[in-house]
Amino acid sequence: MKDAAPQTIYLKDYTPFGYIVEHVDLTFKLHPTATRVLSKIRFTPDTSTSDKMFFLHGEQLKLISAKIDGQEISPSYVEGGLQADVPDTAFTWEAEVEINPEANTALEGLYMSNGMYCTQCEAEGFRKITFYPDRPDVMSVFDVRIEADADNTPVMLSNGNGVSKGEGFATWSDPWPKPAYLFALVAGNLIAHTDQFTTKSGTEVDLAIWVRPGDEGKCAFGMEALKKSMTWDEEVYGREYDLDEFNIVAVDDFNMGAMENKGLNIFNSSCVLASPETATDGNFERIEAIIAHEYFHNWTGNRITCRDWFQLCLKEGLTVFRDAQFTADMRSEPVKRIDDVIALRARQFPEDQGPLSHAVRPESFQEINNFYTATIYEKGAEVIGMLKTLVGDAAYAKALDLYFERHDGQACTIEDWIKAFEDTTGRDLTQFKLWYSQSGTPEVTVREEYNGETFTLHLSQKSAPTPGQDEKHPQVIPVAIGLLNTDGEEVQPTMALELNKAEQSFSFEGHTTRPIASVLRGFSAPVILKQDIDNTRRAFLLAHDTDPFNRWEAGRDLARDSLLGAILEGAPHNAAYLDGLKALLCDETLDPAYRALMLGQPSQSELAGVIHKMGQIPDPAAIHTASEALRDAKARAFADMLPDLYAKNQVEGPFSPEAGPAGKRSLANAALALVTRLDGGATASQQYAHADNMTLQLAALSALIDAGKGASALQAFYDQWQSDRLVMDKWFSLQVMHAKPADSATVARTLTQHADFEMKNPNRFRSVMGILAMNHAGFHHQSGAAYALLADWLIKLDPVNPQTTARMCSAFQTWKRYDAHRQSLIKEQLERIATQSNLSRDTSEMVGRILD
Ligand code: ARG
Ligand code: ZN
């Protein structure tokens, strides 16, 4: 049997499957190297479709027997599956296949992780479990029986509700029709942290987080996050949970963050396990968000799923948007917005401005796993946010109610989604839909005009060509603005202007003094804003803007321009920026978490992107030097207040991961990083010695490494944590992240030789190679050593785990920003990867697109 050869799949070619799957019965006889899967599936011809070819997907399956209505048949193998002659009335398909979970290092289908059986079926993993129409528009109810050796595998879980269990077996039944990508099975020696939740209509739900023995002390936070998510979805979206149990499992080997399988969410252990000693505040916040994300998928993804994988953003963009709303409600709305915009600029903008640029709803792909991208998730969420801004909160809520009511139990498209909004508001959203089909980051330019009475904002929009899209059309861009007077008072509260033409002007009457505009408040659209304003005006906004996002943005712009001046012209850093920032840092009416964000500055790779957009060639070494110099300048300028800032933000009492204390720790740790530049690490080594939580311990360790005094603390950290895989991932990444540019490749190479480096574990692999690609000056060091090292490891990993390999190829996506020397070094590595024999479909698609 042959796997499907690389071929391009098009949205326009969509055709429905010719059969309805009435019912699926699965029996698993688990064995590490020879698991038997028996399937019994009831098919009925779908009279509304014309295509009556009976094709079932199947990959890496050994067929033992196949029957139709009890009669043995010999199906014909075709690429990626099999075909059979079937009756033209309802029939029962039965098959027995053998699979080898232990050999499955790709972590897709049924595989083993530390002795435990586990599945990952999204997007197309179910076809590695049994023959099936493995496409999201084929939905069915599943009954599952699991049999295994009772001693090694006492716990056996699947979707839905547990029906029965006994010595060596368990059965499960999921009453909700679902596509195969939501199928899940987990079995092994697991311990549960349990709880209960009563839904608003009174159903008792048994909740459990299942972990390997030893990890049971790291579940409490995740459980609280789950209950908060369940309550929030009832209160904000009116969505209730719909089964008697909800299970979460933590798995060490997992390609992505987590997976929303119906009733049985499977999590990368890094995205669910946490204790104060082992997890940072950042980890806690991320875990809370991912638990919420996967839980929210129960309605946006599971009850209403996608017709085909081109519609992936239908569930992902919406669910990311929902989890961001949740985090904003649980924590701080401005802080969450700023965090998200930082991430969007770091991950989505480079993707959308380089060779991998694709639409939020792409029109073709080779390997769908390559499209679980920042564009589909994060830009997809931005599109939902814009839609909400345009129609208003009340209409958004009504449209969502209509969407849930109209499409419950269906596999839908973006057209269905948009129609719910059109029918609710009576508005034509045809032009808005361009956000789903047009790729690239639009640029919005603002020009101001004032005549003594009328203040006018002239807005224009432009999008650069992207791969496959030379012509761009004007999009509907909500530009939230506000106007301030010179005392910093709001004379025009926030309102959204609707820019939908190439050029448009918006006038504000009755302003006898010239107002000061605050544009793109709250980052109301995922665009690049071009506004020709000077530093005095920015400093004013930094001090006075009533929109917390734009106030932060003003500081960010000042920092960026100061850095650009230093990088491109050797100019000294901007004193007005440092003064304005200092005033803010001392302002105790401001949330510490917000002040910590104020202290940040654009990353080196973001600066490289900006310089490239200016039509110049970024020099990674110069960017690194200027970034460090700005931090030194901050340390000197704030020297007199840093000790106080540090002291005032120490948190007393037992650890709490909540936003308040976490914000104080983040401000104290930001102060620590600067203090270390002045005291050579004295404060950091004290903090290290007394740290009783990972947030403080890790920040102290980072500071010590930066001060060149990390060696003994690194050893102590290793001795303390060597048996904790998640903490050891931090130990690996920290060293690569903080390596000096010239040493980065050597540090990373040495770590790959460490006894605890495991290529097969995606978390561990990423904590060295993924971080290497994020150390901008190190990765782009002129020697090319880091490029070659990453390519070596991608070549080694590809046959083991194509999905993770392909994903990490995006480290090279920005290659055309750099000088000819670096371009040729990168090209050489990309071509070396491309010419490997038996390169996976995943990696070959990625490298091909990047080189194109
Ligand atoms: N649906 C999952 C989530 O949003 C992502 C799983 C994707 N997995 C994959 N192998 N492509 O959280
Ligand atoms: Zn998701």
Image (tube, grey):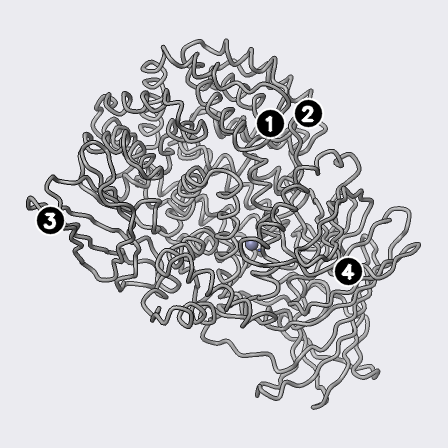
Q: Is residue 166 above or below residue 595?
A: below
Residue 621 at x, y percent in the picture? 34, 28
The amino acid pointed to by label 2 is Trp
- Can residue 728 be seen here? The reply is yes
Which is nearer the N-term, disc 1 or disc 2?
Answer: 2
Circle 4 SS class: strand
Of residue 820 and residue 228, the one placed in the foreground of this image is 228
Comparing marks 4 and 2, which lies closer to the viewer? 4
For the view shown, which residue lies furthest in the right direction?
167
Quadrant occupied by the N terminus: bottom right
Which is nearer the N-term, disc 2 or disc 3?
Answer: 3
Residue 209 at x, y percent in the picture? 73, 45
Q: Is residue 51 above or below residue 461?
A: below
Which is nearer the N-term, disc 3 or disc 1?
Answer: 3
Which is nearer the N-term, disc 4 or disc 1?
Answer: 4
- Badge 3: how crowded within 10 Å, few (<14), some, or many (20+)? some
What residue would you read off at disc 4?
Answer: 161
What residue would you read off at disc 1?
Answer: 731
Q: Is residue 466 above or below residue 651?
A: below
Circle 1 SS class: helix
What residue would you read off at disc 3?
Answer: 454
Q: CA distance from mark 4 to mark 2?
A: 38 Å
Q: Is residue 367 above or below residue 596?
A: below
* Pointer 3 with pointer 1, Cβ within 8 A: no
- Badge 1: how crowded within 10 Å, few (<14), some, or many (20+)? many
Q: CA distance from mark 1 to mark 2?
A: 9 Å
- Badge 2: how crowded within 10 Å, few (<14), some, or many (20+)? some
What residue would you read off at disc 2?
Answer: 721
- Residue drawn at x 68%, y 33% is 725
The amino acid pointed to by label 1 is Trp
Residue 524 at x, y percent in the picture? 34, 50
Q: Is residue 151 left or right of residue 651?
A: right
